[in-house]
Amino acid sequence: MLHELLLALLGYTGDLIIDEREHYNSLGLDNLLVDAPISGEPTFKLASDISFLEPSERDLIQRIIVLGFYYRELDRFATKSRNLSWIRSGNESSLANSTESSKDKIENPSVYRRAIANGIVEILSIYRSAVLHVEQKLLSEMVPILAIVTQGLDKFFVLFPPLHQLIREIERDDIRGGQLLNLLHKRCHCGVPELQTCIQRLLWHGHQVMYNQLASWMVYGLLQDKHGEFFIRRQDDRETNQGSSVQDMSEKLGRLSTDESLTDWHLGFHIYLDMLPDYIHMRVAESILFAGKAIRVLRNPSNAFWCQGAGNQSHSNMPRLPLNVKGNTRNFPLQKEPFVATKLTGEELLLQSEADKIEAMLLDLKESSEFHKRSFESAVDSIRAIAASHLWQLVVVRADLNGHLKALKDYFLLAKGDFFQCFLEESRHLMRLPPRQSTAEADLMIPFQLAATKTTSEEDRYFCRVSLRMPSFGVKVKSAQGDLKEKPIIDGNPGGALSNLSLDMSLDGWDGVSLEYYIDWPLQLFFTQEVLSKYCRVFQYLLRLKRTQMELEKSWASLMHQDHADFANNRKAQFDGSISLQRRQRFRRMWRVREHMAFLIRNLQFYIQVDVIESQWNILQDHIQDSHDFTELVGFHQEYLSALISQSFLDIGSVSRILDGIMKLCLQFCWSIENQDSSSDPSELEHLTEEFNKKSNSLYTILRSSRLVGSQRAPFLRRFLMRLNFNSFFEATARGVLNVVRPRPAALPVLNQQ
């Protein structure tokens, strides 16, 4: 009886101790028992025909043999989870029958579940040793008693039921990967020290798999996750094919093109929240994601990227590479700018000593018997700092980030005022005509290149990266002095796509003019499509403002020319007695209106160029000097662009519409002056003047509101308002507009203000 009891404790039933599911054996289906679902209730029972046991002995034996049932279920789970036949059948894909039978056996292989099964095997090994020790004690006793069995296996009465419940939940809910780690971490918090130690050991085995995946990701930039159990996941399954091996992964990374590396950086990987354990904070997961992507970039430099060095080679024939998140550099090998032909390798960008340091940090975590959250987060932060520092060195120092930022400021933010002044003057007559859909961009390139020749831009080594773009797909354009009939629908043109951001504020058909900046690897990591879209949005706004300011200046020359001509004609007409002062008086009224328009546009231009752009540029430069972290630098640059947009009021719809209306009225006023003749109707100018009064006063009223003046979004707004209202004129007229009881004083119309 005692020998059969010991065998039952190891999962082997017989005549005295039977399994209620023993009918499987009678049908010759023993193999099905391995794949049968884990039973929820113990099925080991004493045979009902045993008559030589006392009721108390029967109850005690029944309690003891439950351990045998738990042992067998745990052993079945471990055997099933550790089955590696799917690897063999996966490699032998030609054997269709073998593959199909393997899928029938294990539908969803799991490396995490296999690791937990290894931990369970350790526990079962200790249990078998305890059973062997009990057997030895029973054999050494003259009168064996059941108390020896219960005393020797006492701790397993505490361990096995929770473990059985654990594996049953794992199999029933198909828990795997990070979800399995999360479940074990929750089960660790219990009041039974032996059970807590046991669960912690299982969790340790699960963490070994996670640390191996982290090492592959954060040391080599490879994602080892065939079964989708890691919390870092690709957007597609290009690297998660069943048949890919470690060697295949290494070869794939070695062949990785710039196209794919840029796609991987921007769109390739994401955090899969379903597999992220609760005890790993989202910030830590994002650091892990960034570190792996950075290592992936550092280990795979572009073939077209060269180290900077001393040299004066010509760069005028450099191929132009449009920004694209998928990259284009492999199709356009760059000629040398001021670069020397020193090709970068992954080892130069990430020294082996640094990779060994990262691996050592993860190895220390892996060898720890317990998971310490603070140590884990500290190691991840250190690894992220190493990756961010090397990426900063690559982008800022080797790729000359600051030079490109300065070029974007010069051309997209109109810091090269002489160039754009010359460009607008050269293209002024062209922009008076309606743009032709097929040749508008080519027409503008002539004054664009001519302006570069006449200014210092031709000597700028970054100018060859700037090109002019004009949307041409689906656009219905018009004359500069007409109304836009239909907003452009742009598809497929990068420059046109960017210009679409500001089409709701169009002045005329030429308002879609935009710039495109060509950049190389690795600057695509920093200058994303979204970043250049913001630059282009500000550029289009500033170019409209610059164009309006120039037209107002040109209208002054036109007014003076007409006035002098009329004065000469009137002197001749004095002898005939036909002198008329009406036309000259109307000219003087137009002078004042033009001056008020120019006053507002000049102050707005000064505010944006000096108070906003220059101040934010200086802040960005300070951050670049102080920071050695790539992610920090990206954040500072995003703050820089956001400040430019917010402090220029481009994100406030009401202000943007008013400013757009003011610029449009100014241009219409200038065109009306130049096109007028003796028979022109003065009511048109009166209408433009009245509309300008309303919009300028509305603008001042909105900008001086406490919501804007008192906020930090526009710290220099008070200076702008002070310049506008230096003589309290705007305040007086704005009060007249808002107060219906006290209309605008007749003595202070805009036309009569000096």
Image (tube, rainbow, N blue to C red):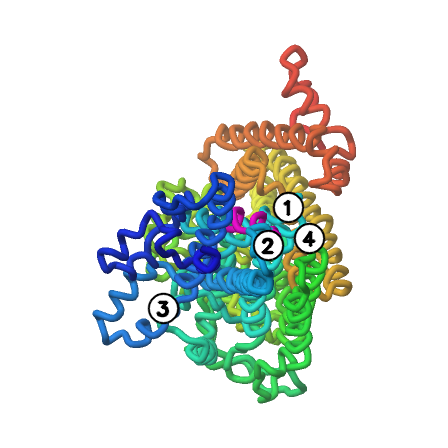
Q: Nearer the viewer, mark 2 or mark 3?
A: 2
Label 1 sits on residue? 189
Q: Nearer the viewer, mark 1 or mark 2?
A: 2
The quarter of the rendered structure image containing the C terminus is top right
Element assignment for label 1? loop
Question: Quadrant of residue 487 in the image?
Answer: top left
User: Mark 2 vs mark 3: which is more N-terminal?
Assistant: 2
* Cα separation between marks 1 and 4: 56 Å
Asked whether 5 or 730 is in front, the reply is 5
* Cα separation between marks 3 and 4: 53 Å
Element assignment for label 2? helix
Label 2 sits on residue? 148
Callout 4, which amino acid?
Ile
User: Mark 1 vs mark 3: which is more N-terminal?
Assistant: 1
Residue at the far top: name it: 741
Callout 1, which amino acid?
His
Element assignment for label 3? loop
Question: Quadrant of residue 455 in the image?
Answer: bottom right
Magenta segment's dominant SS is helix
* Cα separation between marks 1 and 3: 36 Å
Q: Which residue is rendered at x = 39% and y = 61% of the image?
A: 80
Callout 3, which amino acid?
Gln
Asked whether 542 or 92 is in front, the reply is 92
* Cα separation between marks 2 and 4: 86 Å
Question: Quadrant of residue 395 in the image?
Answer: bottom right
Q: Which residues are magenta?
A: 151-163
Q: For mark 2, does the 10 Å Cα neighbourhood hold few (<14), some (14 to 19), or many (20 or more) residues?
A: some
Q: Nearer the viewer, mark 2 or mark 4?
A: 2
Callout 2, which amino acid?
Ile
